Amino acid sequence: MTEAGADGHGSAADLVLRGGAVHVLDPAGTRAEAVAVAGGRIVGVGSDAEIEGRIGAATRVVELGGRSVIPGVNDSHLHGAWLGARWPHTFFGAPDPEAAAQVSGVLAGSRAERRAAILRTGELLSELGITSYTEPGIGPGEDDGETGCFGSDVLGAYRELAAEGALRQRVTMLALYGVLDGPSRLETVLAGIAERAAAEPEPEPRWLNLAGVKIFGDLIPLARQAWTERSYDDGTHGDLLVEGETLERKAERLAAMVRAAHLAGLQIGVHATGDRTIQLVLDAIAGAQAEGGAPSARELAHSVIHGDLATPPQIARMAELGVWLNTQSGIAAHSSEWLAGLMGAETAAEAWDMRAALEAGVLVLSSDAPVLGFDWRRGIADADARIVASGGSVDDEAARRRLHGLLRAYTAVPAEQDRAASWKGTIEVGKVADLAVLAGDPYEAGAAGLPEVAVDLTVLDGRVVFERPGRSQD
């Protein structure tokens, strides 16, 4: 076993988890037996014997009994207020599809309702070991939005809860100046970018951080609205979600939005699903970072959101630039056959290329809840199944390495997207104590069996925020 920085000595810990498999989820796949926590931080990682010296009279000791510990899960594309207002009425996989189809109109119309929705989401996510998430698009572009879940007052609700210490997850947010799933005006978005660049940071950015901006490039191929090289069944190639007289003018304006945000030093999350849109975004990022004095794309940690039809060369370009591909395996699982009907079986088979993204080191997995459910275990199982279907090896060692990468795609890699890898995302000394205790070892269950592995305990900032009923922990 490789020790992960524990010294086994020092002041007593507040919490010790011991007697199991502690998966650090660093690139090397380090594994330990125990972890010690004090003052909200990890103070020791190593063998049971090495951590013994951290146990004092007031230390809570959780006997793992062969269970496992992973870093707290980070769902890096999840609509927190909308999820809390809609749950369990998801768009894909709803337990009652007819009831889900009837949910419409204002879901959270007041500050109190928005706070309640966020708090409900916090409780739901804690039950699955989720300790961080990203709200990918909150702001004035949606102040008149139908649901009430995306406008400026939602940010106000988050700020209140953060100030009260009431958030159950660490929240990263992207500001939205255009319309959700609708066309954006260049002048409006540029003004918003300037406003966001001039804004003061949040008081406690490790709990609420406005990292940058969300830009809508196109919509989804399932609606024939992603901008594509290959045609849809009706002969069209989609469009861009930018106001403009021609497609060429829309493309120029989308590139101008990306360039402005990059040069302002803001992180960009671009909703881009069609291959032509993705190419435009990558070219715009490359051009912006090449300008004198501009930051690098890797430094700003931009992401292509969804990226359904990203090609292998585009994924390789993302790795070269330092751009993440933030995608949802559940959308692929639910809609691949639908896409085949619109664009052909070959296109559907090549879409959502998680195998190439994982191998390139740019894959970030997320749920997009409430479009999907937020069960990250199912997300990993679906991603693994798609990779195997695309030719991924089923050899035991290859499957284990792949699972390690997929677990990191929900923990350590999203922390890199958050520009927070120095202080969260893995179980290492000095990082925040955000942890999830699983009822079994994910590597023994395998990706396909992971959805059956329960979450027994969730630790946030060193505090136990969820314990599975009926499961003795001490």
Image: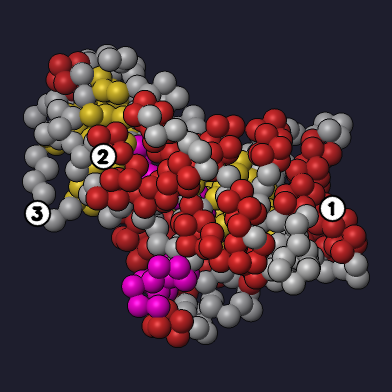
Q: Is residue 76 inside the magenta stretch? A: yes
Point out residue 320 in the picture as x, y percentages from the top left corner.
Answer: 70, 30
Q: Nearer the viewer, mark 1 or mark 2?
A: 2
Instruction: Name the N-terminal-most of marks 2 and 3.
Output: 2
**3D distance between C-alphas at marks 2 and 3:** 22 Å
Binning the other alpha carbons within 10 Å of mark 1 as few (below 14), some (14 to 19) or many (20 upward) gives some
Q: Nearer the viewer, mark 2 or mark 3?
A: 2
Instruction: Name the N-terminal-most of marks 1 and 2.
Output: 1
The residue at which mark 3 appears reads as 470
The residue at which mark 2 appears reads as 445
Please state which amino acid type lies under the numbered disc 3: Gly
- The quadrant in which the C terminus is found is top left
Q: Is residue 24 inside the magenta stretch? A: no
Instruction: Name the N-terminal-most of marks 3 and 1.
Output: 1
Q: Is residue 224 above or below residue 17?
A: below
Mark number displayed over residue 411: none
Q: Quadrant of residue 50?
A: top left
Please state which amino acid type lies under the numbered disc 1: Ala
- The quadrant in which the N terminus is found is top left
Point out residue 129 in the picture as x, y percentages from the top left corner.
Answer: 31, 48
**3D distance between C-alphas at marks 3 and 1:** 56 Å
The residue at which mark 1 appears reads as 256
Q: Which residues are magenta?
A: 71-97
Q: Quadrant of residue 247?
A: bottom right
Point out residue 165 in the picture as x, y percentages from the top left corner.
Answer: 37, 54
Please state which amino acid type lies under the numbered disc 2: Ala
Q: Secondary structure at mark 2?
A: helix
